[in-house]
Image (tube, rainbow, N blue to C red):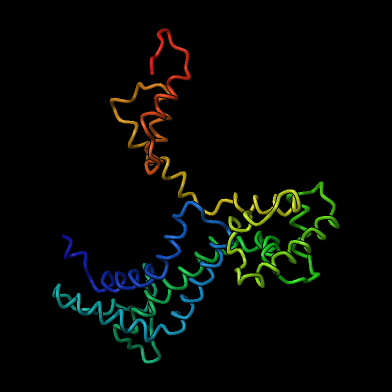
Amino acid sequence: MLLKAMDSEFLISLQVIKVIFSFGLPLCKQLQKKNIDLKEMITLANLSITVLENLRENVNEEFKKMFEEAQRMAEILSIEISVKRITHRQKNRSNYLSLNNDLIPEDYYRISICIPFIESFISQIKERFLTHQNIFKGFQCLFDDTNSSNNADFEPLINFYLPHIDITTATCELQIWKEKMKRMVTKDDEMLPSNALHAVKHCDPVIFPNIFVLLKVLCTLSVSIATPERSFSSLKRVKSYLRNSMKEDSFNGLVLLSYYRNIEITPEEILDEMAKKLRKIDLLL
């Protein structure tokens, strides 16, 4: 039954998905990290889109490699790669015709599978990730080491997150922060903070209270839901049939132990925690 499902369209699609998903693998790994922030994610998404757009421009050469790999698989499976039946009126799929109404299999599957998949993949990345650019425009001023007086994107950011703060005060604080960032580059060849987590470490909440709040907001902006999904996976492993009647406190403790299994806990720490609770008998430790 599996061999019957493997036809020319399946083999070509398999090779196209293999290449396109390989380009999206770094972005997928980045989204699985716990300390990812919005700035770093947008930068990687832009790089991925640029590479995919270059692939779309050179699709003739790139698809030729995919088609050759699909032909090798077809030879192993004794499958002949052929073009789908073309009629004058098609209801279930589109007709792909050339000027002389004669398409070879390579051209047919490049037009029908490869190009639509690449364009759809690029469109989905832009829709999912690059919509955050509108949010990030104001935050980009916090990482800019130039003394530009153009604060058109910074003022809406202050009005949205810090409406009680005077615009003039926040703008002057931003200029001082930019000057500090500029000196960070020239001093000891230190690089600018690459993300919000690094910038928070260099920001003094007493000297730059408004900038510090904005950086904390940027750190907490949700990029993906990988961390909550991990907690649900831990919950499924811990809550077995035998532990179904466990109390909530004990159950929460087991989930935390399962989730943060890389943190080592000594028996002395457990005994110290147990000794803090009032008991009917004295524990001699």
| In the image: residue 174, left or right of residue 137 | right
Q: Quadrant of the N terminus?
A: bottom left
> Which quarter of the image is occupied by the C terminus?
top left
At x 44%, y 55%, the residue is 32
Residue 58 falls left or right of residue 157 = left
Locate residue 217, reporting x and y percent: 65, 50
Instruction: Kindly indicate the quadrant of the structure image that contains residue 199.
Output: bottom right
How many numbered badges does the structure rendering display? 0
Direction from residue 192 to residue 165 in the image, left or right: right
x, y percentage for residue 160? 75, 51
Q: Residue reaching furthest top? A: 280
Q: Is residue 161 above or below residue 257?
A: below
Viewer-closest of 49 and 27: 27
Residue at (54, 66) in percent of width and height: 126
Q: Nearer the viewer, residue 20 or 177?
A: 177
- Farthest residue to the bottom: give it: 100
- State whether residue 161 is above or below residue 72: above
Choose top left, top right, bottom left or bottom right for residue 260: top left
- Which residue is found at the position 28% from the left and 25% from the top? 242
Quadrant for residue 152, please give it.
bottom right
Q: Nearer the viewer, residue 12 or 227?
A: 227
Nearer the observer, 136 or 166: 166
